[in-house]
Image (cartoon, grey):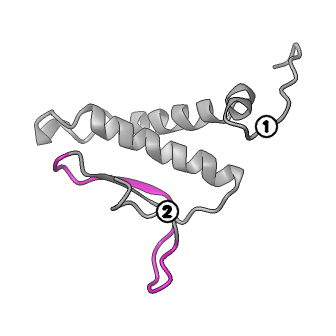
Amino acid sequence: FWEKSMFVRPPDREVVCHGSAEDFYHDSDVRIKMCTEVNQEDLQTVHHEMGHVEYFLSYENEPTLYRGGANPGFHEAVGDTIALSVMTPDHLHKIGLLENVQENQES
């Protein structure tokens, strides 16, 4: 995964940098392609794509006919669930990206 995925724009060629995740249907060969920068948007996007990867891996042992996912909307929902769970103040604090977490009635 780490050797075959692309997280940085290659200097020697043009690429489409929009985040995407792919399942190559062979020996857990899943990849993410996106040109990341260190910012909140890309943190959320890369985790959204990782949600797709986890979904791919969850059905990798199924016959090819059943590996396309239940529904494109469900696939997106899995990606969004992972991305949103990473962006909670408690999690950002736990991984050292947010100094203080304030508890209040609205949160």
| Magenta highlight: main SS | loop
- Is residue 91 shown left or right of residue 32? right
Query: Residue 44 placed where, x, y %?
Result: 61, 45
Q: Nearer the viewer, residue 19 or 68?
A: 19
Secondary structure category for the residue under label 1:
loop
39 relative to 61 in the view: left or right: right
Question: From what the image shows, is residue 103 above or below residue 46?
Answer: above
- Please give the label number shown on residue 98: 1
Query: Which residue is drawn at the image coordinates 47% and 72% (left, top)?
Result: 16
Q: Is residue 50 left or right of residue 42?
A: left
Q: Name the quarter where the C terminus is drawn.
A: top right
Residue 21, x across and y down, in percent: 39, 52
- The answer to whether 7 appears left or right of 107 in the picture is left
Seen as rendered, the residue at the extreme bottom is 12
Q: In the displayed structure, would residue 105 be above or below residue 69?
A: above
Quarter of the image for residue 4 reads: bottom left
Residue 25 percent across, percent down from the top left: 19, 49
Count the numbered circles shown.
Answer: 2
Pointers 2 and 1 in contact (CB under 8 A)? no
Q: Which residues are magenta?
A: 9-27
User: Looking at the image, which residue is at 70% across and 34% down?
Assistant: 92
Q: Which residue is mark 2?
A: 7
Residue 93 to residue 44: above or below: above
Q: Which amino acid type corresponds to the residue marked 2 in the rendered image?
A: Phe
